[in-house]
Image (cartoon, rainbow, N blue to C red):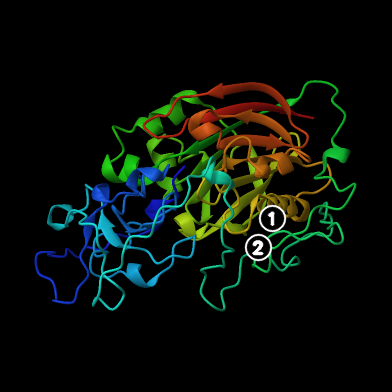
């Protein structure tokens, strides 16, 4: 469920917090701050940067520091000059137990340094408790990407075949505001190839697919592979035709540890989303990725992509479009800053622009959204839900347009915090 923290490189610097400039703000221990327990993510304790900008506004998310900022966050932060999601200034910086400098941080003393470090700010009075904090209206968010950044695959033309299904937008619909990820709903009657599925006659070609969030920063970083637990699970649960990985910073390493490097081609172009296909049975026709969403400021790591490959079976000529997605954070805000509708429609647009009529489409991944999220509601209007995991309230899912679901398996975690999921499809 966490983002791909392996994408961030931790600084080697170590700060001695016992030596401060006289006007330096105090850095606190996160667990001593009163609003700590109000946050369902335990106020960034699950993020391995072990540091945060804390908010004194009850039931408001803190700003989490990833591994890139964690080691030097105590002195190189701007917490007291930034606003939390409810418009108040953050109270300051704090460190979680596990941070290298946690022991040198201070217990919360009921006061906080002002932005100019010259006068204390009183703690704001707590508002009436919300019956359901997930339904609270948040302030509009803007993209944090640098000016001039161009999202991949958003021009609607590059590399799109004239034989593709195509994308039709319902006039007058718009989701995602004025953000780069704005999208319209599919036009009435638009279909992701499901209206051209082959007739189900004869014996289908069986296609076995794996989706697996590898929990990379912990499984391979902290635990150094955990005795090759993930590789052993993949090897023992096969054979597979296709595999999709999330939180995977080295797909070739995964193939090596599973003993599959000789027969699988790996592909991981962006955001630690990896996929692999059996190159003895399938040949590559096209591949790439499209940026489809962006994390909320509540837990921001960047944009989110969908990686795809169009593959043809060498013996039967049947063609599939495999799409692997790792969704925007946090999970209780589906769709991140773009919203769940825009996220779903951008994925459907990718399918329309990359799949041809008659292709079997397989969409899989860790969507970072609970099973009842609008993201899934919208996808299920156009695709068939084939299988859902149980980890983190159903964030891991499989979808298809034409595939017949023959068998589903939850393979266990293999040392991850997600289950590896396997679906056997039949295609005609």
- Along the line of sight, which residue is nearer the eye, 242 or 146? 146
Out of 305 and 169, give the one closest to the viewer: 169
- Judge left or right: residue 243 versus residue 359: left
Question: Can residue 242 be seen at all in this image of the molecule?
Answer: no
Residue 351: percent from left, percent from top: 73, 50
Identify the residue position indicated by label 1 in the image. 342
Residue 244 vertical position relative to residue 287 in the rendered view, above or below: above
224, 149: nearer the viewer = 149
Tell me the crowding category of disc 1: few under 14, some 14 to 19, or many 20 or more residues within 10 angstroms, Cα based. Answer: many
Q: Name the residue under label 2.
A: 181
Q: Position of residue 377 (x, y in %)?
A: 71, 39
Instruction: Left or right? Give the position of 92 relative to 164.
Output: left
Q: How far apart are marks 1 and 2 (CA)?
A: 7 Å
Q: Which of the marked residues, 1 or 2, is nearer the chain's N terminus?
A: 2
Quadrant of the rendered image containing residue 179:
bottom right
Q: In screen coordinates, is 89 left or right of 389?
A: left
Q: Report the side of 25 relative to 205 (left or right).
A: left
Asked whether residue 427 appears in the rendered view, the answer is: yes
Query: Of all residues shown, which one is farthest toward the left?
Result: 18
Q: What element carries label 2?
A: loop
Q: Are marks 1 and 2 in contact (CB under 8 Å)?
A: yes
In the picture, the quarter occupied by the C terminus is top right
Residue 1 rendering spot, x and y as whole percentages: 47, 42
Q: Residues within 10 Å of mark 2 (few under 14, many from 20)?
A: many
Label ID, residue 305: none
Residue drawn 46% across the image and 52% down it = 127
Rendered residue at 51%/38% (across/down): 263
Q: Residue at x 50, y 42 (%)?
A: 245
The foreground one among 25 and 306 is 25
């Amino acid at each position: 469920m966490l983002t791909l923290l392996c994408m961030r490189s931790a600084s080697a610097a170590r700060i001695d917090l016992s030596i401060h400039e006289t006007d330096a703000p105090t850095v606190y221990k996160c667990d001593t701050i009163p609003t700590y327990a109000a946050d369902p993510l335990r106020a960034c304790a699950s993020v391995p940067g072990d540091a945060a900008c804390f908010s004194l506004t009850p039931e408001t998310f803190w700003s989490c520091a990833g591994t890139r900022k964690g080691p030097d966050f105590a002195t190189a932060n701007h917490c007291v000059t930034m606003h939390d999601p409810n418009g108040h200034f953050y109270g300051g910086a704090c460190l979680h137990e596990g941070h290298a400098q946690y022991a040198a941080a201070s217990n919360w003393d009921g006061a906080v340094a002002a932005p100019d470090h010259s006068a204390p700010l009183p703690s704001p009075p707590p508002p009436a408790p919300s019956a359901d904090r997930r339904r609270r209206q948040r302030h509009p968010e803007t993209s944090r990407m640098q000016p001039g950044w161009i999202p991949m695959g958003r021009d609607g033309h590059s590399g799109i075949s004239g034989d593709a299904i195509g994308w039709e937008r319902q006039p007058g619909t718009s989701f995602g505001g004025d953000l780069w990820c704005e999208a319209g709903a599919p036009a009435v009657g638009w279909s992701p190839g499901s209206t051209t599925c082959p007739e189900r006659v004869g014996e289908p070609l069986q296609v076995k697919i794996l989706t697996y969030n590898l929990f990379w920063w912990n499984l391979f970083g902290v635990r150094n592979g955990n005795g090759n637990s993930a590789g052993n699970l993949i090897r023992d649960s096969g054979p597979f035709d296709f595999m999709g990985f999330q939180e995977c910073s080295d797909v070739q390493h995964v193939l090596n540890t599973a003993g599959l490097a000789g027969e699988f081609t790996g592909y991981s172009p962006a955001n630690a989303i990896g996929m692999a296909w059996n190159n003895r049975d399938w040949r590559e026709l096209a591949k790439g990725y499209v940026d489809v969403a962006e994390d909320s400021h509540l837990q921001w790591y960047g944009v989110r992509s969908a990686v795809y490959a169009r593959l043809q079976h060498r013996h039967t000529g049947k063609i599939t479009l495999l799409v692997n997605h790792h969704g925007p954070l946090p999970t209780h805000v589906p769709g991140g800053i773009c919203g769940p509708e825009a996220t779903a429609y951008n994925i459907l647009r990718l399918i329309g622009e990359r799949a041809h009529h008659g292709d079997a489409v397989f969409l899989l991944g860790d969507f970072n959204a609970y099973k009842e999220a609008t993201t899934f509601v919208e996808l299920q209007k156009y695709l068939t839900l084939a299988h859902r995991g149980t980890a983190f309230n159903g964030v891991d899912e499989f979808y298809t347009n034409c595939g017949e679901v023959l068998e589903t398996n939850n393979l266990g975690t293999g040392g991850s915090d997600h289950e590896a999921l396997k679906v056997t499809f039949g295609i005609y």
